[in-house]
Image (cartoon, rainbow, N blue to C red):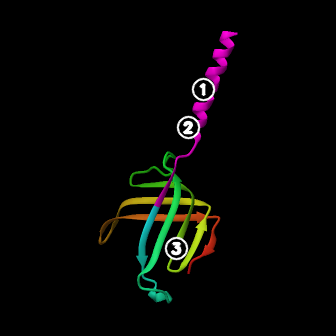
């Protein structure tokens, strides 16, 4: 009986450990800047904001030299006076990309399950 109880407790602890490891650790990130929309009939210093939530424990889905990719759970974006929400997507980061004017970082953002529109 004692062996069965110990076995049941050990099995329960192992399954709790596995369940805890599989849970995401949500983190919210913000990007807040301005953009010139005067060529599109908007303001010269229009708001440009993106807020998204991701799992900071999830592995990079594109782990190569100077780039990485991370899954996004959800977020919002504002460009000028327009805004949208999205139910998921991805962000890709490219570090030290060579251009004629020197090296810079580039961020590529994609989203799905979009509600709303911009421009």
Residue denoted by label 2: 21
Q: Residue 26 at x, y = what percent?
A: 53, 50
7 up-or-down from 24: above or below: above
Q: Residue 31 at x, y = what percent?
A: 44, 66
Q: Is residue 20 magenta?
A: yes
Q: Main secondary structure of the magenta part?
A: helix
Determine whether label 3 and label 2 are within 8 Å by CB.
no
Determine whether label 3 and label 1 are within 8 Å by CB.
no
Instruction: Identify the residue at horizontal 58%, vertical 42% (top origin).
Output: 23
Which of these two is toward me, 78 or 110?
78
Relative side of 105 to 47, left or right: left
Sequence-wise, the earlier of marks 3 and 2 is: 2
Sequence-wise, the earlier of marks 1 and 2 is: 1
Which element type, helix, strand or loop, lies under badge 3? strand
Q: Is residue 27 magenta?
A: yes
Residue denoted by label 3: 78
Disc marking residue 13: 1
Label 3 – label 1 distance at C-alpha: 45 Å
Label 3 – label 2 distance at C-alpha: 34 Å
């Amino acid at each position: 009986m004692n062996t069965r109880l110990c076995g049941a407790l050990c099995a329960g602890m192992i399954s709790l450990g596995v369940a805890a490891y599989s849970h995401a650790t949500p983190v919210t990130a913000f990007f807040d800047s301005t953009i010139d929309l005067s060529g599109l009939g908007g303001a010269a210093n229009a708001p440009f904001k993106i807020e998204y939530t991701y799992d900071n424990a999830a592995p990079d889905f594109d782990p190569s030299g100077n780039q990485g990719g991370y899954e996004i759970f959800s977020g919002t974006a504002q460009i000028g006076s327009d805004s949208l929400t999205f139910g998921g997507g991805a962000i890709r980061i490219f570090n030290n990309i060579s251009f004629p004017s020197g090296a810079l970082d580039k961020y590529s953002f994609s989203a799905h399950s979009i509600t709303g529109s911009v421009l």
